[in-house]
Amino acid sequence: MKTILVICEGNICRSPMAEGLLAKCLPSIQVRSAGLGALIGMPADVSAVLLMHELGLDITRHRATQLNRQMCHEADLLLVMDGEQRTRVGSLYPQVQGKSFRLGEYIKQDIPDPYRAPLSEFRRVLNLIQDGVAEWVQRIQKL
């Protein structure tokens, strides 16, 4: 596995946090993120930046990017935040259905969008992201 693409809606909250965590845990794999309805060019949400900083990760350079066919084609694994996003990605790019999964697949959990929510909700979402990342990292390292 060489490339992982993490997908959420706006690409400013969940996917940048997941991207940062996966990149830290899997330094030999290129990790990118994008949004289905990206707020193109926007930085990561202030709450996401703060929480990642608390974990020793700097996502201040992140800028939201719109998902496209080339990104999907180049990625070996696509991780979305919920079942509805997985369906949308599969509808837009049917060729990636076999390599598209929920980040919370193995914890049996969708990752809700904390956009415009209080910091406490961002923390709760980050905990879910961390749990999902831990499961994926364990499985990927066995490959």
Image (cartoon, rainbow, N blue to C red):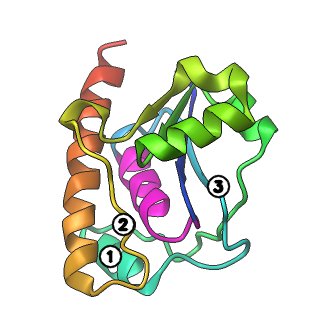
Relative to 127, say whether 7 is above or below. above
Residue hosting label 3: 36
Relative to 133, say whether 129 is above or below. below
Total residue callouts: 3
User: Closer to us: mark 1 or mark 3?
Assistant: 3
Viewer-proximal residue among 94 and 79: 94
Q: Secondary structure at mark 3?
A: loop
Mark 1 → mark 3, Cα distance in angstroms: 25 Å
Q: Evaluate whether residue 54 shows in this view.
A: no
**Residue visible at 45% across and 69% down in the picture:** 13
**Residue visible at 73% across and 37% down in the picture:** 92
Quarter location, residue 36: bottom right
User: Closer to us: mark 3 or mark 2?
Assistant: 3
Give the residue at the far top of this rendering: 143
Residue hosting label 2: 57
Tell me if label 1 and label 3 are in contact, CB under 8 Å.
no
User: Of the residues shown, which amino acid type is indicated by label 1?
Assistant: His
Q: Which mark is residue 53?
A: 1
Judged left or right of residue 44, residue 66 is right
Q: Secondary structure at mark 1?
A: helix
User: Of the residues shown, which amino acid type is indicated by label 3?
Assistant: Leu
Q: Which residues are magenta?
A: 10-24
Query: Is residue 125 covered in magenta?
Result: no
Give the crowd class for mark 3: few <14, some 14-19, many >=20 residues within 10 Å: some
Secondary structure character of the magenta stretch overall: helix
Dot 1 or dot 3, earlier in sequence:
3
